Image (tube, coloured by chain):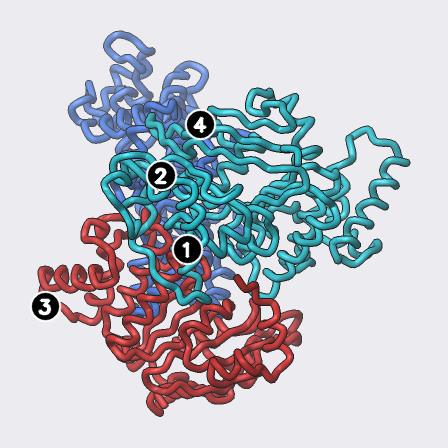
Amino acid sequence: MMEKPVSVTESLNYPRPKLTGIPKYLKVLGRSFNQKNSMLTLGIIFATFIILVAIFAPVLEPYDPTKMDLALKFIPPSAAHIFGTDNMGRDVLSRIIEGSRISLSTAFMVVIFSACIGTLAGMISGFWGGKVDMIFMRIVDVLLAFPTIIFALAISTVLGTGAINLVIAICCIQWTSYARVSRGEAILLKNAEYIEAAKAIGNNSLQIMFKYFLPNIVSKILILASLNIGSIILYCASLSFLGLGAQPPSPDWGAMISDGKEYMRYAPWMAIFPGLAIAASALTFNMLGDGVRDLLDPRMCDSVKTE
Amino acid sequence: MQLQVKGLSKKYYSGFLGNNVTDAVDDVSFEIKEGEIFGLVGGSGSGKTTVSKIVMGLLKPSAGGVFYNNRDLTKINNRQWYLLRKEIQMVFQHPQMTFNPRRNIYFACAEPIRLYKLAKNKTEEKAMVEHLIERVGLTKDQLKKYPHELSGGQAQRLSITRALCLQPKFIICDEPTSMLDVSVQAQILQLLKEIHDEFNITMLYISHDLEVIQSICDRVAVMKNGKIVEIGKTEEIFKNPQHHYTKQLLESALYI
Amino acid sequence: MSVLLEIKDLNVSFTVDDKQVHILNNVSLEINKNEVLAVIGETGCGKSVTGSAILHLLPDNAIVTGDILFKGKDITKMNEQEFRQLRGQAIASVPQSPSTSLNPLMHVGNQVAECVLENNSSEDDKKKTVAKVHEIFASLGLPRGEDFYQNYPCELSGGMCQRVLIAMGVITHPELLIVDEPTKAVDWALRKDVVDVFCELKNEMKCAMLFITHDIAAAKYVADRIAVMYCGEVVEIGPTDSVINQPLHPYTKGLIASMPSKGFKVMNGFMPSFQDLPKGCRFSDRCECTSDICINNEPEIVEIAEGHFAKCSIYKNLNVSELFKHAATS
């Protein structure tokens, strides 16, 4: 929602609502439901649903996702098998539910690792500047010059296939965007008067970085991370479609589409339902990301809406 | 001599290959005696803030030295600086921007106490903070607030509290009242005078406002384009300015 | 002297978080033709709100009651369409911060000319306007000629930007100029220049001004009359000389005494927040001569000397001769 210009009222020393630390987010979250931040509301509802499904996968699966029964292969969607069965006679619904665990855990791992590495690197290079900054930023430039998928393919080929290697491969590229953002923030903060004041009362560099920079950068990183999850889910799926992710028999959405493409003509449900799952989860997390951005960065939201 | 500044210069390089040199501060020397309030006056861009930052160790000078009790502050390492910060403190220009916007006032006041482990435990820390905050005229319930909730005058008092926490012997005030209203300015000046008399603190007071300088400083130096053009006792400079820039500054005063 | 702008019992409140906060309380001011009225007061006393209210520039959550009569017509009742005819033409303003109020990507000359030119102006009009801009630049002490006209704001110093803004304000020959804190962002030497420009403006352009400032010395140089505001109220209003040399309201006295050149005598306490104002006189909790009347009753504004009003209970029970004696001795 457009914030009303409050400059006049601000100048008059109102006790404004306390908007600091974690309670701030909770408070604003509460308000967002009133203010029709529908993007966020929907995003939260769907994301919670997907995460709950992933957590309670073993309970929710109607069949064992890895149990093969060739007698039951290629059953079209029916009451017994809502999403049908695949070429090995495994229940597609159960495999999708089980696959959500793999997809989500890879995506979250990628985001967490790359956010940590990127934030740290960006903060260090922004804080120290000079040579350190130059070295870090040249590395970032080089990495950004590669298309993500091609680079991840190259890394996976070197490290071998597997879920962990997939995470490493995507992290190698993804940390750069976090580094860029946190470096920019760090440079802005470096010149803030309260950082100088903090130095003047005797904080050393490390204390400044962790006590002052990190809390101020975190909200920006949070926005980026929540926007990023959706696209990471897509990257993971496309890499595992190419056979670089989790190995059979563990059910991975990308790999399931890859399996299903051969039987597209007479068993289209094998590829369609995992595809829908990917689309739905990517959409959900994108919505969540947009919502979080509007929430934490009202300026950005305004500019998007006036465009 | 508590503080001596000798031949201080700070050059900034810009342009292609750094061949454009700007002298932010050019061969500045002055001395401050113990217990004195020394004023530094000049227009914007005259390099007075740069001098304060070099003295405070926040910038490295291109040449020259700053001697505090005959120790060259520009040549000591971080560890020694950490110990010296107890003695040299600073009050900044923009009061509300001197504090981390995400932490409350209590944290801001307690931070120096924690950094130098002055209090044995939480209760002692709390007592120290409360004692100081009442000394500068704020109330205990303001400790729970956040910096943006304070008015400029309150924030500047807080800034002074924080400087006083460490019982410094030397305070640098970088335009502490330029953002404040006259009535609040009077309160802050009064407070600075009181702490100066009470704790015998030496002060370097930087301002562009000649009226303020005239009313609180013992000696004064006039800066223009990074150079000191005139230095002397406040009364003498205000009565009998020698340099034409000082005269010009005095002429542009608006008397009431 | 005829009255140009008359503000009668102006009340402004803001709705914040479903609560109403009363900012301006019965502000009444008058500006005569060719007269400069300075409104002085501290940050957050409502002086800028007064200026914005005249210009219809208050945010949407403001509730305005009372009358603002400009040449007899009530401008609070006008709709945007009608008011646009006035704003920029008969009533102009000079905004607060010179560095951020100019478009950084436009020649300063064009920015000034834009104030007069319409979209469909003919070439002839444009030439005339450009000539006029040059003229105004020259009269404000800016260099005449193409070179200056084609500068970008970033190429100018703060004082020059301020003058460009003034040029934008006066090019339409307004009858009333509202100036908001012109000396706030400028340093010592420039402050004198800015004040000089306004003095010249007052003498040459002959336009009336509402000079909003916290700088008492600047107000003294520019203004004919001074209104002192505290907590959204006009507490004292009168001719410049008598307000500065014989202040009547305790707040004005305190304000002047706290000037560094007057020995910075400290006033007690802070300005209260608008949400918990004292019940009676708004200055009662800081005043040196508070009595029971001050705490319980809102004082009335009383004329103490000719044209010199103060809103304080001390003067309530004095009769006229005592009042004049009081004014003379204080």
Seen in the picture, residue C159 relative to A98 is either above or below; the reply is: below
Residue placed under numbered mark 1 in the picture: C330
User: Alpha-carbon neighbours of circle 1 within 10 Å: few (<14), some, or many (≥20)?
Assistant: few
- In the rendered image of the structure, the colour used to display chain C is cyan
Hey, which quadrant is residue C301 in on the image?
A: top left
Spatial CA distance of label 4 from label 2 is 37 Å
Asked if marks 4 and 2 fall on the same chain, the answer is yes
Rendering colour (chain B): red
Which is closer to the viewer, label 4 or label 3? 4
Give the CA separation, mark 4 to mark 3.
51 Å
- Dot 4 or dot 1: first in sequence order is 4
Left or right: where A59 falls relative to C117 = left
Amino acid at dot 1 = Ser
Q: CA distance from mark 2 to mark 1?
A: 16 Å
Residue B120's label in the rendered image is: 3
Q: Secondary structure at mark 3?
A: loop
Residue A31, percent from left and from top: 32, 28
Cβ–Cβ under 8 Å for marks 4 and 2: no
Q: Which mark is nearer the camera, 4 or 2?
A: 2
> Viewed as shown, does residue A57 lie left or right of B127?
right
Q: Chain of mark 2?
A: C
Left or right: A89, with C312 as reference point = left
The numbered mark at residue C316 is 2
